[in-house]
Image: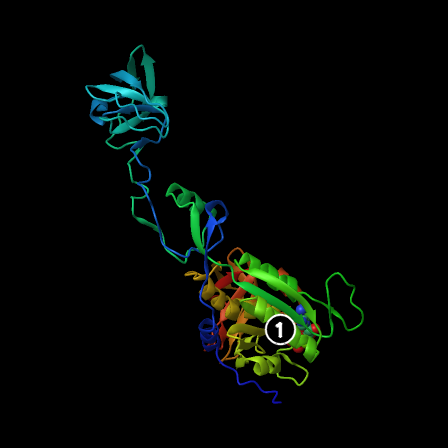
Amino acid sequence: MSRFFSVISVTDAVKVAEKIAPLPGKETVPVEISAGRVLASDISADTDVPGFDRSVVDGYAVRSADTAGAGNSAPALIRCAGRVAMGKHDATLAVGNAGCAYIPTGGILPPGADAAVMIEYTEVAGDTVLLKKAASYGENIIRKDEDFQAGETVFLAGRRLSPQDTGVLAACGCMDVPVAKKPVVAIISTGNELVPGGVVPGPGQVRDANGPMLSSWLREYGCEPRLYGIVKDEREAFEAVIARAVSECDVVLLSGGSSKDDRDMTARVIADKGTVLVHGIALAPGKPTIIGTIDSKPVFGLPGHPASAFVVLIAIVRPLLDRMLGQTDPLINTVQATLSENIPSQRGREEYVRVKLRDGVATPLFGKSGLLNTLVRSHGLIRIPAGFEGLEKGSTVDVILW
Ligand code: AMP
Ligand code: MG
C-alpha cells in the first residue's frame, strides 16, 4: 500500500465533509432547557411585547405638557387622580385635565399620560403632587410593541440560543422551542498502545486522551457524544466496533491509525465497508485524515496525536456538525491580536499554530504535535491559509479561542 497521500486542500475537504452531512433532524424542547441549542425554525412574537404602554420608573404618570417649565424652585402642582396597580387595568383611571397618577415601574400608563416623572423629583401634599422636574413627551415610558410587534420575526432559524434568548422566547409565547436534534457522534480510540486514563501506563503504553477530549468538545458544541472505548489494531475487533457505531450513531470519529501505513487499518476498513472520499489533507497538523462514509454515515479517521486530532475536529469536522445542526454562525470565538514574531509556513497547506495571548499580543508556541502541553498552555489557534508563506511579526491575526 502506498505511503503517499493524495492530499486535498482544506477547502475541498470541508466541501466533502459538508456534502456527506446528514440532514438536520428536528425536535421540540421546553424553553427553559433550550439554551445552547440551535433553532430549527424562525420564531415570531405571538403578541406585542410589551402589550401596553408602561412606565420604566416608580413615579407619576403625567401629560408632559402639564410639566413644562417645572423645576425645583417652581414645581408643577398637579392633582393626583389615583394609583396604577401592577398587573391591573383600571378603566376609570385617566390622566387628563391637569391630573397625574402614581405609577410603579412596569405599570400600565393610564389614558392621557405620555410620560412619567421619577418619584425622586416629586413631593406629595394632600391630593396634590409637586413635580420638580419637567418630563418630555415619551420620557420614562416604553411603548406598547416597542420591544417586538405581534407577528414580527424575533429569531431566525440557525441561531444558537443564549440564556437571554430563552427569556425573549418565553416573552413571545414560545414555550416549546423547535431545535435541531443533537447529532449523535461515536468516538472510537484505536491503537495497541492505548490504555484508559484510569490505568497507569506500562512501558510503551499511552493513556487515551482523545476519547475524553473529543467527547467534551462535542458535548459543548451541542452534540451527543458516545464513547466506544479503545480498540486494538485488530481487524475483527475494529470492524465490529465500527459496525456497531455506524448503526447506533449519526457520525463516527475514529482517532489513531489514519496514516497510510500497512499497520493502519482505518482507511482499509472504511474502503471495504463503504467509501473513502479523502485520505490526506493539506493541513498541519492533521495531514493523515480520512473522510469516508459507511451506510451513508460520515466516518472520520482523525490523526492519533491529540493536538492534531483537535485541529482536524475544529477545521474539518466542525463544518459538518454545523450543517447537521443547521447552524448559521459557527460557535467559535475569535479575537484579533498582534503577532509577536514571524511564523514561517509551507505554502500549499493550511497551518494551525497554537498561540498564547496576552494584552492583545499573540505569541506562537511551536510545540511538536505529539506534545499535549501546548494544548493547555495556549489560548487558541491562528490559521495560516494555504497560499501564505507565513505570517509576519506585527501583523494582525484572528485567534480562534479554545
Ligand atoms: P497514529 O495516528 O495511530 O499513528 O498515532 C499517532 C500518535 O498518537 C501515536 O504516538 C499514538 O500513541 C498517539 N495516540 C493515538 N491515539 C491516541 C489517543 N487516543 N490518546 C493519546 N494519544 C494517542
Ligand atoms: Mg495507532
Whole-percent x, y for residue 89 in the image: 31, 26
Q: Residues within 10 Å of mark 1 (few under 14, many from 20)?
A: many
Outermost residue on the top side: it is 126
Which one is nearer the viewer's eye here, 174 or 156? 174
Task: Report which quarter residue 196 is drawn in.
Answer: bottom right
Note whether residue 121 is visible: yes
From this view, report whether residue 106 is shown above or below residue 400: above
Whole-percent x, y for residue 26 in the image: 45, 58
Whole-percent x, y for residue 341 in the image: 54, 68
Task: Report which quarter residue 268 is drawn in.
Answer: bottom right
- For the N terminus, the image quarter is bottom right
Q: Which amino acid does label 1 sit on?
A: Ile
Whole-percent x, y for residue 172 in the image: 37, 43
Task: Report which quarter residue 112 is drawn in.
Answer: top left
Residue under circle 1?
242
Residue 85 falls left or right of residue 237: left
Which one is nearer the viewer's eye here, 86 or 348? 86
Colour scheme: rainbow
Which of the four quarters of the rendered structure image does ligand 1 lie in?
A: bottom right
Which one is nearer the viewer's eye here, 324 or 12? 324
State the count of labels. 1
Mark 1 residue element: helix
Q: Answer yes or no: disc 1 within 8 Å of ligand 2.
A: no
